[in-house]
């Protein structure tokens, strides 16, 4: 399926949903310093060919403009005439779509994901012992020992890709980039948002619990 064969209505729905999610995350202060990017897939999917709408690079994501999003293909190439550059991290989205077939991917830079990624970097994952909100990640097993992968971060984005390919756990709909932020995905925007919110809760819980265990203040 070529991009032109996808209906205008489907493309419009993706742009409306991206706007809605962007506004919701902005209200939570999840885009400090222009950080973060959002994408939603449109049309049919195969690992070799797919399309998605994504935030333009370097924009102030607390402000809405007519040029906040654009559509790209599985190689991160824009598929419509535009002056916008897709997110600098579009290749990360491409790889996650290729590996998972997800319908939406949301990335934010939060303080808890950054702190916890450095704290547990030596073990390359964040351990989570049976906290109830893992159900928000669609994991229903009693007392499940969840390990959220931590992936090394590089300024050169293509260098991150093999790390993701290697670390991604099919049961866990997200990864943390070390001292960078969290990526969460899902079958659609609703699910990806639920996963991101669950991860953020879990990171804060794990951080505060670790501080309590050390007898340190949690604030
Ligand atoms: C200013 S934060 C550094 C880039 C980054 O990590 C990010 O999430 C935002 O980059 P984009 O190109 O998507 O605006
Ligand atoms: Zn980022």
Image: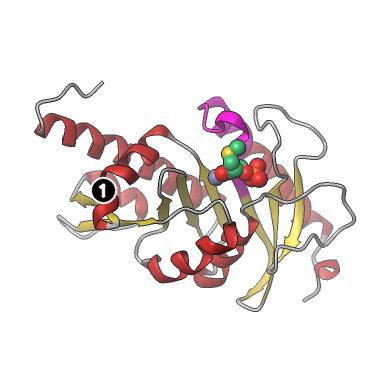
Residue 36 seen by the camera: no
Q: In the displayed structure, does residue 20 sit left or right of residue 187?
A: right
Residue 37 visible within the image? yes
Q: Is residue 161 left or right of residue 166?
A: right
Seen from this angle, which residue lies furthest front?
Answer: 155
| Nearer the observer, 17 or 145 | 145
Q: Nearer the viewer, residue 166 or 146?
A: 166
Indicate the quadrant of ligand 1 in the picture.
top right
User: Magenta stretch?
Assistant: 21-38
17 or 151, nearer to the observer: 151
Residue at 18% across / 21% down in the picture? Answer: 217
Q: How many marks?
A: 1
Neighbor class of circle 1 (other Cα within 10 Å; few <14, some 14-19, many 20+) is some
Q: Is residue 164 above or below residue 15?
A: below
Q: Quadrant of the C terminus?
A: top left
Q: Residue at x 58, y 56 (%)?
A: 156
Residue 144 is one of the magenta-drawn residues: no
Label 1: which residue? 120
Question: How has the structure been colored for display?
Answer: secondary structure
Residue 35 placement (x, y as % from top left): 58, 37
Residue at point 74%, 60% (across, down): 72
Query: Would you say residue 32 sits in the magenta stretch?
Result: yes
SS for callout 1: loop
Left or right of 39: which side holds 179?
A: left
Residue 130: x, y in percent?
18, 50
Please identify the quarter of the rendering in which residue 92 is found.
Answer: bottom right
Against 35, residue 174 (above or below) is below
What residue is rendered at 83% in x and 70% in y? 5
Residue 25 vertical position relative to residue 133 in the rendered view, above or below: above
In what quadrant of the picture does the N terminus appear? bottom right
Residue 117, position as x, y percentages in the image: 34, 46
């Amino acid at each position: 399926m070529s991009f032109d064969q996808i209906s205008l209505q489907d493309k419009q729905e993706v742009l409306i949903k991206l706007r809605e999610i962007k506004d919701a995350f902005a209200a939570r202060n999840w885009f400090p310093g222009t950080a973060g990017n959002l994408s939603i897939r449109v049309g049919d999917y195969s690992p070799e060919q797919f399309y998605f709408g994504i935030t333009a690079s370097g924009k102030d994501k607390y402000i809405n403009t007519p040029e906040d999003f654009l559509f790209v293909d599985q190689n991160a190439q824009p598929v419509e005439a535009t002056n916008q550059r897709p997110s600098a991290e579009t290749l990360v989205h491409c790889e996650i779509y290729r590996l998972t077939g997800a319908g939406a991917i949301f990335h934010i830079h939060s303080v808890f994901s950054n702190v916890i990624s450095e704290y547990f970097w030596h073990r390359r994952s964040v351990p989570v012992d049976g906290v109830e909100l893992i159900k928000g990640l669609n994991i229903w097993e009693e007392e499940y020992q969840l390990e959220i992968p931590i992936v090394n971060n590089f300024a050169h984005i293509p260098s991150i890709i093999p790390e993701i390919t290697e670390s991604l756990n099919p049961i866990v709909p997200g990864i943390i980039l070390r001292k960078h932020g969290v990526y969460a995905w899902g079958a659609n925007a609703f699910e990806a948002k639920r996963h991101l919110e669950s991860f953020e809760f879990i990171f804060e819980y794990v951080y505060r619990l670790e501080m309590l265990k050390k007898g340190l203040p949690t604030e």
